[in-house]
Amino acid sequence: MTIKGLANKKIGFIGTGKMGEALIKGLIHARLVPSENIYASDMDIAKLKMLEKDLRINICSGNCDAVVNSDVLIIAVKPQIVPSVLSEIKSSIKNQLIISIAAGVTIDTFEKNLSPGTKVVRVMPNIAATVEEAACAISPGSSVSKEDLDIAVNIFNAIGKAVQLQESLMDAVTGLSGSGPAYIFMIIEAMADGGVHEGLDRNTARLLAAQTVLGAAKMVLDGPTHTGELKDMVTSPGGTTIRGLRVMEEQGVRIAMMNAVIAACERSKELGKKN
């Protein structure tokens, strides 16, 4: 895949935890950049060596090494250590585009801790980057050009779907799509448990539950039809579906999902205040 603005670009990662690794794998699998153009640093040397062996990326001796070898630098560390990382790499940053995926850490935090004019883009992706189906929201900083923004959008479109939003909505994105895969994993597991209860073997129940969620999501994404109308398409008068929906409403599934998103959003705000 050839992406405009990314030809021969080198992409660096500071942090190769679950999300950092997911993005690296997603970029390579999508053929956005070759593995030899990816550089990574992490305190976990064993993890770095594993990625070097499995994915053939370049591993760096330290964070500053990752910076100087990159045109685009992705900060993928835990939110609470972002300030110390920025202090360490500040003098090594020249004209790199800095992309942060640290939940709850504002663009202002980056711009205040780095040199004036540093190009910063904040992104909230999710773990589905590993299968190139990530949901990503992107907000540019004050020094980001259209070309810079296009690069960021293209990177994250290559591993899913990216939308540009004002930064004030990032906590909502974190609570919804950032944390959302965990909610859906729980739903799939519960659906499969129901199937096992009724006699299906575990593997069959799991496959049917997961494919059902995938198919339903594709129906939502492929057309403008409201989710309520889609629900009605499956719901026959006096049938099985309406019986199941009644139980879901009685047991508060809808409000539980809403409250999960809201709670995760509030936690994202708390993390942001600490940084």
Image (spheres, rainbow, N blue to C red):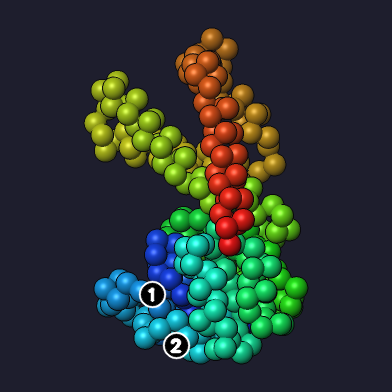
Q: Amino acid at mark 1?
A: Asp
Q: Amino acid at mark 2?
A: Asp
Query: Which residue is the extreme one toward the top?
Result: 238
Assign a secondary structure to mark 1: loop
**Which quadrant holds residue 118?**
bottom right
Q: Is residue 225 left or right of residue 21?
A: right
214 shown above or below 152: above
Residue at the image position 44 percent from the left and 44 percent from the top: 182
Q: Is residue 246 visible to us here?
A: yes
**Which quadrant holds residue 5?**
bottom right
* Badge 1 density bin: few <14, some 14–19, many ≥20, Cα 10 Å: many
Residue at the image position 52 percent from the left and 26 percent from the top: 253
195 shown above or below 62: above
Assign a secondary structure to mark 2: helix
Q: Percent position (x, y) of residue 192?
A: 34, 32
Tally the numbered discs. 2
Q: Percent position (x, y) of residue 32?
A: 51, 75
Question: How far apart, in angstroms, are the residues tagged by discs 2 and 1?
Answer: 11 Å
**Viewer-side residue, 269 vs 19:** 269
Residue corresponding to mark 2? 65
**Which quadrant holds residue 189?**
top left
* Badge 2 density bin: few <14, some 14–19, many ≥20, Cα 10 Å: some
Q: Percent position (x, y) of residue 260?
A: 54, 37
Residue at the image position 32 percent from the left and 33 percent from the top: 205
Residue at the image position 46 percent from the left and 75 percent from the top: 14
* For marks 2 and 1 on the same chain, the one whose residue lies earlier in the sequence: 1
Q: Is residue 51 visible to us here?
A: no
223 shown above or below 169: above
Quarter of the C terminus within the rendering? bottom right
Residue corresponding to mark 1? 42
